[in-house]
Structure formats: C-alpha cells, structure tokens
Amino acid sequence: MLPLALYISDEFRLLSRAQLQRGVSQYFTVPDQLLVSAWQELKNLTPEVWQPGRRQEQIQTDICLPTRLPPPLSIEESNQRFNQYLNSPTPRNTPLIINPADLHPRFEPLLRERISEGISKRLQVIALAAREQGREVLLLSPSEEALELTLGIFTSTLALPGLEGWNHFGICLPTASKRALPTLGYLEHLGRAFKLNIPVLLLTGAPETSEISNAQHLGYPEYPVMTDPAHCDIAFELCDTFLHSTNNTCLRTRLAKSRPFPDHYSAPLPPTDIYLPARLNATGPIRGQWLIEQALQDALQRVQRERWVACPLIAGESCTDTLARERFNPAHVEDMIGEVCDCTEAQVREAFQLAVEAQPGWNDVHVSHRADLILRWGQRLQQELNTLATLCVRESGLVLNDVLGDLRTAINLCYYYSAQARTQLQTRPLHGLPGEVNQLELHGRGVYICITDDNDPLATLVGQLAAILVSGNAVLVNTGSATAFSATRLIELLLETGLPESLVALLPGPTERVSAWMAEDYRLAGAVFFGDASEATALNAMISNRSGAPLVPPLTHSSLPGTQLVDRPLDNREVRELMHSAFSFAGQRRASLGMLYIEESIADQLEAQLISSLQLLHLGDPAEPDTDIGPLVSRHQMDRVYHHIERLRVRDRLLAQLPLDDRHDNGFFVPPTLLRLYTLDELQDCVNGPILHLIRYNRENLQRVIDEINRYCQGQAFGIHTHDEALIARVRQQLQAGSLMINRSLADLSAGVRPAGGAGTSGTGPLYGGPNYLTSFVRERTISRQL
C-alpha cells in the first residue's frame, strides 16, 4: 500500500500512473484509523505545510449539484439524457456537471470493457460543445464503487482529439472519500502527462447516505467514506496539504459545501457489526475494483488448473473405491472439471452406524462449544471465499456475483445459528414449588439426513449443516450432483475446525436412489429436504412407511418460483430489482421471481420497461466479469425449460427473448425470456429457469388472483408494489405466503433479517434463517428434582 506520506514527499513525482492507480484502489475500504494515524504522522514530520485555517482562504463555490437520477433503463433513455446535457441551458459561468451514469444504462465497473469507449466519445462531444461555448465541464462519480471506472473514462476522454490544451474539463471529488488524496495524486499525474490544468471541485461535508447503505448491504469490511465529522475534516486536511504542496502543479481546485451533517448526528456502526448481537455481517469482495478482480481471477485460474474429485466422505476419509463419473463445465461441456464417485448402499449403512455411535457424545458437548465450532466454520469459509466461489462458478454455471452472494448468506447463517444456539439451546429453569428444582433441557434428536438440490447451492447446504450440528445431531448429506465438488470442500473445511469426523458424511449419487437408502433406515431421527415438491412428498411417504420405526419430523422446502403483483408504475430502480429477482441465478434460485401480475392500466408501460431491460442482459461464460446470466446446471434442466418455452411459443405467448449465437452452442444456455400467461392454470408444472411469466389482471378480479396464487404457489415468496394500504391489508390477511415483500422485490435470504421457507406445497417450515428454526432439530426433556 502506498503510504500517504509519499503524496507530500519529493518521491511523489517518481511514481508511475500505474502505481498511483493502484494507490486509488488500495484505499477503498481502509480503516478510518489508518488515515487518522497518517494525518497525525504527517503533521509531526512536516509541520511547516499544515495550515488549519487555510480552508477559509480557498475559493468557496455555491454550486447546486444535479440530482442523482436512477440509471437509465434503456439506450433510448440514456440518449435523451445525453441530449439534455448537450443542450443544457446552464449559464456560462456555471460548470456543467455530468453524471457519467446518465450516459449508459449499464454504468457498472464490471462492464468497463463494454461501455468505456462509448461513454468517452459522448463526453468528447459534450466537452467540444462546451469548449465552443466557453463553459467548464466536470464529471461527478455516481458512487465510490464506480470511482475507478469514472477515472478510467476521464483519462480516456482527455486523450481524444479536440481536447488538447483545454483546461476546463475536470472532476468533482468528495473530500469525505477515503480515496480523495490518492485520487488527487492520480489527477495531478494526468495533468502533467497531458500538459493540462485540471479543474477539481472539492465537495466538503457529510458523505452520501447511499455510500453507507451500500457498504452495509454488500458487506464491505469498512466504509469507503469517512463517517465521523472529525475524520471528514482530517480527510480534507490531507487533500488540502497535498494541494498546497510543491507536488501540485496541475490541479486548480475550488470548494463547495455539498451536504452538512444533520443535527444530533451519530456515526453508523461498522458494516460488519450492524446486526449485532444477533450475528456478525459477513464481508464480500468489492466487485469492479482492480485489486479485487485480480485476486478473483487468480483464484479462478488456480481452480481451473486443478482436477477435482468428489467421493463419499465418511469419517473424514474419501472413499475412492467406487466407479467414477466425469463432470463437465455446464458453460463448456467439452471442459472436464473432475470426477464424482457415487456412494454405495454399504457406504450409506457404514456412515449411519458411525454417526449413530458418535452422536450421543456430541450431544453431551456443551452448546457453547458446538456454537464456537460453527462460528469457526463460518470464519474459515470467509477466509476461503475466493476459492469456494470460483469453484462453484466452474461447476454450477452460476455467475460470480450470484455465487458470492450465496456464499455470504452461507457464512451469515453460520454466524446466526451460532449466536442463536447460545441463547435458545441452553438449559432453562422452570417454575416450581419451594423445595424443588425444575428445568427444561434441549437435546439433539440423533442422526439426520440432509438432501439438497442445486438451488442456492452453498447457502442451502451450509445453513442446514450448521443448524443440525449446532443442535447436537449428526448428519448424512446427499447434495445435488452439479455442486459435488463445492460440497466436498465445504465439509472438508468443516472437519478442519475440529468437528468429530463421524458426525458428518457426504454421500454423493442420484438423489432418488441415495435418499431411498437413507430414508428406510430405522435409526433415522430426522430429515431435511430441499427440492421439488413431488420429491418431498415421496420422501415423506418412504419415511412414514417404515414398519416399527419411530416417527420422524421431516423439514421440506420446495423450489417453487416466487410471485409478485404490481398495481402502480415502477421507477427505474424498481424495474432493475424485478429483473434481478427474475434472472439472477439464471432463474434457478428458490426465491426467483417466476410470475408477475400487472394491473391492466400500467401493463403496457411496465412490459415495455421489462423488454428494454431484457435486451441489456449479457448471457455468456459465468467466469467472465461482465456476464449477467450463465448456463443452467444440467442438460436435463435446460431441456425442461426449452420444452416449456416452446409450448408457449407455438401459442404466440413469447413477448421477448435474448438472442443466442455460436458462443452458446457448447453449454446449457437458455436465453432470458418473457412469456405471456392469462392464468396460472396454463402452467403444467414448476419450471426453474430464466423465465418470467407476465399476467395482466383487473382490480375487480383481485380475489380471483389471490385464490389462484394460493392454489398454485401456496406458502411461497410473494411481493407486492402498491400504495394502496387497503390492498396491502387484504393481501396480508388472505395470501398464504411464506415471505411477503411490500414495495420491494423478492429478496435473497438474510439470516435473522429475511428468513425464507414456506408452507403447504412450498414446505413444512419453520422458516430457515429465522429465530425458530433451531427448535426443529431438538427434543425437549424436563428434569424435576426434589431438594
């Protein structure tokens, strides 16, 4: 990391552009204290350059910053905003401030290779027009996350013809940014390289609230901005010192007060602590930043070089004595990833016996020790984040952003269940008469079987193992074949934390066959199943028909798509969230949006927005950073989805579909598709894939809609966008939804915040990731003692 003292020292001019660019990336989420310490050290080393009152001497500028609009939803809308900038009536003595996110509907750091050239050319046109008019042009980065992208576009634009020697194209820079000083250093280098004086408008004051909420939502390790008023002043002083040093020869700066801190302001908790005491908040890589992307690419290359093997894992030993099946990359079916060895019936019996013998000892271990172990597992997953994520991308076909989100959910489930166990699973005192002591004890039930599909592949498996084990049980696992390598690595990391090896066994193989072997064993104490509702029914029947076996409570969660109802116009942000709900995880996630009911009066407008947004999605190799949607997990799944699309296409129900080309020939790709339905009765079965069904309805037929949803999507996730409080109350009362989202899209599971699950055909509950889930895995015992 470049020391901040370098920016004030004589060595600054020896730094290359690449080194200064790296410095900008390095300071994205450094701790506040690092900048505070650097400030104090510089004050002690170079007291002659520090003039605290100098801020008042600088030019104060009263500039009204433009309102940050949601990004345009289509190329047409971005063209409109470009023309507005080009024909802006701003007075000549007022700079034209441009948000580059207005110039492209996908202004995202991961798409820099696709969008940078086009945006630079648009900025060139605006700048040339402003030069003729004698006006100044300033860029305003839409977010800290997009700062590196903005600086790259700014650099490319300076090199375009017609802007040589023009000293009126610059940038706005919030001084609350932790990267403000490194950014100034980078801009100074550009000024010298292009022989320009670059105008810089320093925006002082409080950071944008969106920077705080974004860091919390995405799990940044630290905030990218200063959140304490005193620290914001320090960040400004660091910038001010550089600007008044001899190292600054090309930056022409002014100050503008952008946002004052509100009265009675208090700094937010660190992003990792916002959910305490319920749980820690897992951190995730900050996508689109140069150093982070380099680390992810390095991890992907390591995964691609390795030949992976997934075999039955029993008592910590890999059993390689069974016939192996080759597994191929779903994005490139000629690319072999490794081999999977299916378990045998004898291995299932062996794993059962070992688990039955080990479980009583594990149940006797104090719950705090079990909780510590699950917490350590979550921490190990955090340490192995890049490797686990890139491995899952390679074998499942999910894009990296989806897998990283799923893995963060998995880690948060470890944190949450660990914290919940410490409070919920302790022995509790009961009331009693004088002279007696009464207690309630909670014990593990015994040996569970856990059967998971390939939806939410990491979070589902990790969450179930964490809940079952922390409750004092043993578990045998049969997971989806498409993620067998990831499952193997997850359990290896679990065993590394110190879990007794016989408590968990991985038994890969066809679910229908392996589940039958596991479910018929009379020693079975419980079952957890994630998958198709019909398969859950069959498993429940097998367990119930065991002659002479104890009753076993099955927990099931089906993969029915979610449903949403909209009766008001949606803004660009809300439409983007709808698209993300429908097409992230290639539509295979358990809470993916599959059915969208649209009120007739707004249907034309919303359908047009969805069709425009669909054309901007990129279907391709999930290992590429700019890919939005990857292939499906298997040929079987692809064939099912294509059959469903074709069945509706011949009935003229196809509204829009992304085109395919020869790049998609060697993978299980299905293009994102919008289909028209008139009623859910037209669906033959549940199909998980990149499909969104649009159904129009009239307000007077709302009761029919509610009845239809309850009949076909009972207990599954449901969302509603409306300002009608009476409608909200009616939906809350009548709809049998496991999760109800009001004026927000269907969201991912968030442990302790948004638990998931269902009832009826959608599952048996309770909601996983919720406060009642652990109680499903324990049996109660009362102890009464006379003193």
Image (cartoon, rainbow, N blue to C red):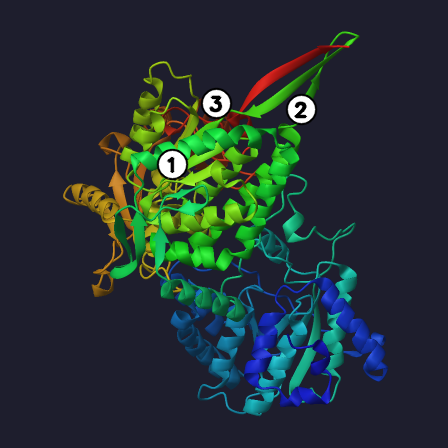
Q: Which residue is mark 1?
A: 563
Q: Is residue 255 visible?
A: yes
Quarter of the image that includes the C terminus: top right
Q: Nearer the viewer, mark 1 or mark 3?
A: 1
Q: Name the residue carrying label 2.
A: 427
Determine the secondary structure under disc 2: loop
Tell me the kind of residue under disc 3: Gln
- Which dot, 1 or 2, sits closer to the camera? 2
Front disc: 2 or 3: 2
User: Residue 524 at x, y = what percent?
Assistant: 41, 25
Q: Which residue is mark 3?
A: 733
Query: Mark 1 or mark 3, which has the lower sequence index?
Result: 1
Residue at 34% from the left image edge and 46% from the top image edge: 587
- Identify whether 253 is placed above or below 552: below
Q: In the figure, 527 relative to 501: above or below? A: above
**What distance separates the C-alpha of mark 2 from that of mark 3?**
37 Å
Screen quadrant of the N terminus: bottom right
Please give left or right for residue 161 compared with residue 538 in the image: right
Return the disc, 1 or 2, that comes first in the chain's sequence.
2
Residue 535 at x, y percent in the picture: 30, 30
Q: Earlier in the sequence, mark 2 or mark 3?
A: 2
Looking at the rendering, which quadrant does residue 640 occupy? top left
* Snapshot quadrant of residue 178: bottom right
Q: 460 and 309: which one is in front? A: 309
In the drawing, does residue 435 fall left or right of residue 466?
right
**Number of other residues with Cα within 10 Å of mark 3, as a class: few under 14, some 14 to 19, many 20 or more:** few
Residue 417 location (% of width, % of height): 57, 37
Q: Residue at x 42, y 21 (%)?
A: 552
